[in-house]
Image (cartoon, helix red, strand yellow):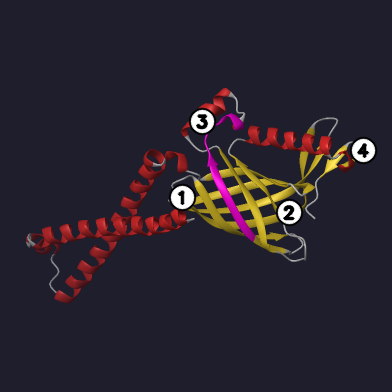
Amino acid sequence: MSKILQNVEKNETIVRNNASLAAIIVLILNTIANVAPQFWDWLYIPSLFFLGIVILVLNVGSFTLLYFIISQIHKLLWYKVVHRSWDLRKEWHVIQTDDNKPTYLRVGKVCVTQNYYQVHMTATTYDVRYDNVANEWVPDKSESTEWKEDLFLSDDDDMCGLYSAKRASNEIRRGFHDFKLEKHSAACKCDVKQQKSCMKSIRHINGTFCDIVYAKDNDSRVGIIRLYREYEKFDSVIIEICRHICKKHPEVLENGVFHSKVK
């Protein structure tokens, strides 16, 4: 946790350094302009008041433009070169399970935006209907949940944050996510093509979730959460989980169909 808090300060340092560099460039340009009076003569501004306005506008405009350019170049290098494996910006697929409740299985999509070490997630999740005979599943969108959260990355590939979730029934929950960014390992069970992608960047994120604020007594959720970049991997894991649930808990089947339940 201490390393994550240190990276909060790193985010602030990055912003200060980018702003300082932009300010230095503006000062250099001002110095050049001051030692070249013919530049102001060329503009031909007879009033000192209007000259001051022009200089102010030029300074503010040049600083804003330079800061934007410097920030974009720095982010490009940070995401694509220095910390390529930490570039999480994309739409991910999510799976949530609760070991204490076999019928709890939620799936959906997570949109991830990022500002260096700071990560923001917004997600929508649904229940699942799984046909045990056909070995196929579809999302059941009758009971959706919207959740969002802010997280921070650590240098150890850990990521923690607090989420706030709201269901279609207006029930609100808040809790804690503890993630681990996963590169390729034997546990990933990816095909060869995906293994190569895993070596270059984070393709899987595994972690736990725990409700700390919830609407009803004895209704907290503590479980496993998994995020995948590729739909194929996401799809295969859902089928694997459903088959495991149906085998271990055959009582959940109704006419050969397993229907997960959020409650």
Mark sitting earlier along the chain (4/3)? 3
Q: Is residue 16 above or below residue 127?
A: below
Quick one: SS at disc 4? Answer: loop
Find the residue positioned furthest to the right: 255
What kind of secondary structure does the magenta stretch mostly adopt?
Answer: strand
Q: How busy is the neighbourhood of tag 4: few (under 14 within 10 Å), some, or many (20 plus)?
A: few
User: CA separation, marks 2 and 4?
Assistant: 24 Å
Q: Which amino acid does label 4 sit on?
A: Asn
Q: What residue type is labelled 1?
A: Ser
User: CA separation, marks 3 and 2?
Assistant: 32 Å
**Which range is magenta?**
175-187
Q: Indicate the position of residue 152 as horizontal and vertical percent values.
A: 49, 54
Between circles 2 and 4, the one closer to the viewer is 4
State the residue at coordinates (86%, 30%).
133
Q: Which amino acid does label 3 sit on?
A: Ser
Q: In this view, does 9 lie to the left or right of 216?
A: left
The answer to whether any part of residue 131 appears in the image is no
Seen from the viewer's position, the closer of residues 149 and 41 is: 149
Quick one: SS at disc 3? Answer: helix
Q: How busy is the neighbourhood of tag 3: few (under 14 within 10 Å), some, or many (20 plus)?
A: some
Quickly name the residue at label 3.
197
Between circles 3 and 2, the one closer to the viewer is 3
Q: In this view, does 216 lie to the left or right of 233?
A: right
Q: Indicate the position of residue 91 as horizontal and vertical percent values.
A: 57, 44
User: CA separation, marks 1 and 3?
Assistant: 22 Å
Between circles 2 and 1, the one closer to the viewer is 1
Quickly name the residue at label 2.
144
Between circles 1 and 4, the one closer to the viewer is 1
Magenta stretch holds residue 84: no
Between circles 1 and 3, the one closer to the viewer is 1
Q: How busy is the neighbourhood of tag 2: few (under 14 within 10 Å), some, or many (20 plus)?
A: some
Quickly name the residue at label 4.
255
